[in-house]
Structures are given as structure tokens and as C-alpha cells.
Amino acid sequence: MKRNASGALSAILLAAGLSFAVAGHAAPAAHTHDAHADHSAPATLQLNAGKKWGTDEALRKSMDSIRQAVEGSLHDVHENRLPPAGYGALASKVEGEVASIVANCKLEPKADAQLHLVVADLLAGAEQMAGKVKKAKRQDGAVKVIGALEKYAAYFDDPQFRPIAH
């Protein structure tokens, strides 16, 4: 994601006390609640000593909601038939669920730091789908969101969550 294309959601995340990688640079912010220790997001996703990171109900619910929305549009995305308004609606759904994750985040600090990487990809994909990234295809934004969902499934303990088959 280009630094100048970060948009309103980045501001929301920063105001909420989250930090995430933007254009290869960590953007730490002052943390305002105990669940977020002062830290920078690591550069790559890692397991927790070989195990998946813990999740909470709010995170699982939001990630499932994103998954269902993307899966519902997948055929049109693959067939290059999803209109700009459809990508815009999908982007809004992703942004709304990320805002819910931010508002209800209760992960331990190390898991939270890992989640920042997934959130950064979700937001970058949403910005592309919304048409906010110049010279980027909206379809590639959907692919980025699908990739973030795959990372979530691989690194976070959510037994009911299944990555999207595509």
C-alpha cells in the first residue's frame, strides 16, 4: 500500500492505538488501553512457538463476516464481472469489519502484533477495491483480501474458519 493512499481507515486505526506496516515502515501509535502493549508490528507473520495465535469471539465473528462477503462475490471477481459499485460495497464491508475488530480487540499483545499484519493486508485490499490506489486493479484488491484471509486461517486459532477455495 502506498503511504499516501492510506486514507481514513489508517487514521482510525492509528487513533485506536494500532500500528501496522505501511510502505515497509512501521507506524507506531500511542496505545490507549491495556490490551495493546507499546510495540511495532513484526515484519512477517509468525506462529506462537509453533502454535496458532489465540483469537476472541469479536475477531472470529468479523473475520467470518469478511470471508462470507468475499466468497459471495468471488465468482464475479474471477469472471471480471463485479462492477465498481460491487467492489466499493465489498471494500466498505471489509472496512466496517476491521473497524469492529479495532473497537473490540482483546488479544494479548504478541497476538495483536501479528494481527496487525493481517489487518494491514485487509485495509490495503479494501483501498484497492474502493479505487483509492492509482493504477491498481480493484480485482487485485479482492485477491489481497483473500490472501489476508488465508494468512488469518494459517496463523490464528479459529477452528470454524476456512479459507476461501479459489
Image (tube, rainbow, N blue to C red):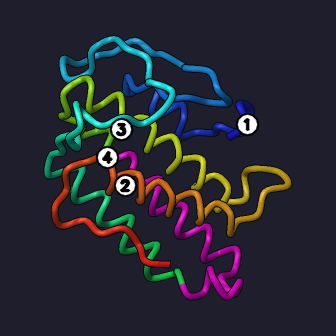
Q: Which residue is mark 2?
A: 97
Given the image, on which type of amino acid does mark 4 rest?
Tyr
Q: Earlier in the sequence, mark 2 or mark 3?
A: 2
For the residues labelled 2 and 4, the Cα–Cα distance comes to: 19 Å
How would you classify the magenta stretch by its main secondary structure?
Answer: helix
Nearer to us of marks 4 and 3 is 4
Q: Which residues are magenta?
A: 75-100
Q: Which residue is mark 3?
A: 115
Query: Could you tell me residue 35's position as x and y percent?
Result: 20, 23
Nearer to us of marks 1 and 2 is 1
For the residues labelled 3 and 1, the Cα–Cα distance comes to: 20 Å
Along the horizontal axis of the image, is 97 left or right of 10? left
For the residues labelled 1 and 2, the Cα–Cα distance comes to: 22 Å
Nearer to us of marks 2 and 3 is 3
Query: Could you tell me residue 144's position as x and y percent?
Result: 58, 57
Given the image, on which type of amino acid does mark 1 rest?
Lys
Query: Could you tell me residue 104's position as x and y percent?
Result: 23, 40
Residue at 29 percent across and 31 percent down: it is 112
Q: Earlier in the sequence, mark 1 or mark 2?
A: 1
Given the image, on which type of amino acid does mark 2 rest?
Glu
Q: Earlier in the sequence, mark 4 or mark 1?
A: 1
Q: Which residue is mark 1?
A: 2
Given the image, on which type of amino acid does mark 3 rest?
Leu
Q: Which residue is mark 4?
A: 155
Kind of element beneath mark 2: helix
Kind of element beneath mark 3: helix
Residue at 32 percent across and 57 percent down: it is 153
Given the current orientation, which residue lies at the most extreme right position?
A: 135
Kind of element beneath mark 4: helix
Q: Earlier in the sequence, mark 3 or mark 1?
A: 1
For the residues labelled 4 and 1, the Cα–Cα distance comes to: 25 Å
